[in-house]
Amino acid sequence: MSDLNGFHFDAITLSNVKPERVEWLWPHHLPRGKVVTLDGDPGVGKSTLALSFASTVTNGGRWPDGTGCPIVGDVILMSAEDGLADTIVPRLIAADADTTRVHAVRGVPLPGEHGDLRMAVLTDIGAMRDLIEDTGAVLLVVDVLMAYLPSGTDSHRDQDVRRILAPLARLADETGCTILLLRHLNKGKGDPLYRGGGSIGIVGASRVGMVVAPHPDDENVRVLATVKNNLAAIAPAMTYRLVSTEGGVARVEWMGESDHSARDLLDATDEGDTPHAAQEWLHDYLQQEGRAPSAEVKVAARKAGFSERTIKRVASKLGVAAESYGFPRRTHWSLPQSNTQSGHQPTAPIGLGPTGPTGPAGSDQDERGEPIGPTAQSGQRMSTGPTGTPTARSGHSVSPIQGNATDRPEDNFGPPCSVCGKPVVAAQGDTHISCRRVVIARNKAALDAPQEDTA
């Protein structure tokens, strides 16, 4: 039925649709006939990376994960930022691309005899279709997306970008040509889905979204990670670096997989915290403060612009030691040379995890309510402080980074336990929590035991 204006929906019964398998240029990264986004800050090598993709497609080479490109095809480039003769062609040659299969869009001819061109835009669907069909292209690279939006488009308005990308997605589907859209990152923070320039509708319309960023541990290495994938599982991130040929032209050199996620990469980028800067900050902080509660260190690090993940990573590099003591048990960090300057035995560096001599240490022990005494499972020994109060000295257990240390290391002991006679923390009353459990269990066992017949 049609409405009063004569319009109607064009619908199809799904039993008439033949199922098809998803085809890939690069499995888990570049699906055939789909829109894909590639985001990254200026200078990280997005364009060079895209040209390496083009090279693999034109020569049927292998992708960095070892899979082969299943089709040899042509590539169309729409580049608004780099020169053809001095940048794009040299980079393609350095990447061993078959340049006879690469076609660059220079513009759209204007009426007249002067040969003038206007800027091509993404609403030139008919012209794009003609070029794709004439060349048999299987990959179209748009570098960068914002340069090819038509005048008057609000790139941050979802309705505007979807009106442009919906026809583009249909074009990709109908021609089988993958359309790769390059974007710069915005200045926001948080979810990587929202970090590409423009509306969330851009990555929403894409079937795969990728991001490239510097490696958090090596500023000379780049990491390619997947932000979203609507067609397959998220693939492991891949690392690469940009190297120069003898002629000074940049090319991509792949280095293998990485366990970093897109969020890891952008968190580090957001903070502006190079590993070197974070390491210097932590060293200076612990040198000034000495042994410090780990939670206080992390709070100070956040104020200085470093994430908890980054500060943990550089703490491990510095060999920072983590000691757990006090009640409630708290974790303290110190530089390696600080451990012998305050009467404490040296401890293992951060990252070794719980290593109490006879069992779990750290927060696990705290939950059991064990006393910190000569026979405590942490292996600590008791000594008498200047006021006669028992204090924990040597043998502090080495625990993983807890991130919740806020109290001072002093212990607050009360009277001896009514069951075992060992010191009790005042908050537990006159009996250890663990001792109460033992008494309760014994009483229950006695009640459950069969009674002797005295008749």
Image (spheres, rainbow, N blue to C red):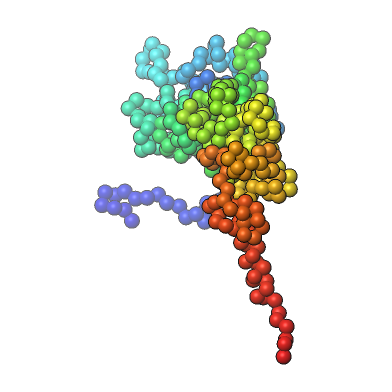
Image coordinates for residue 356, horizontal then vertical, percent = 70, 44
| Front residue (pair 206, 122) | 206
Residue in front for this viewpoint, 160 or 304: 304
Q: Position of residue 106 (x, y in %)?
A: 47, 18
Instruction: Say if 307 sits above or below 18 in the image.
Output: above
Relative vertical location of residue 326 with respect to residue 435 in this rendering, above or below: above
As drawn, which residue projects farthest toward the top? 247
Residue at 47% over, 35% down:
190
Give the percent coordinates (x, y) of residue 448: 67, 75
Q: Quadrant of residue 28?
A: top right
- Tell me which residue sits at (62%, 51%) in the image: 423
Relative to the observer, which residue lies in front, 348 or 235?
348
**Residue 333: which quarter of the image?**
top right
Q: Against 404, is 365 above or below? A: below
Instruction: Measuring from the top left, give residue 297's x and y in whole percent.
Output: 53, 32
Depth check: give the residue in front, 428 or 184: 428
> Is residue 29 at all visible to an observer of this figure?
no
- Identify the residue at image location x=47%, y=55%: 13
Quadrant in which the N terminus is drawn: bottom left
Residue at image coords 49%, 34%: 299
Outermost residue toward the left in this view: 4
Residue 280 visible, this orientation: yes
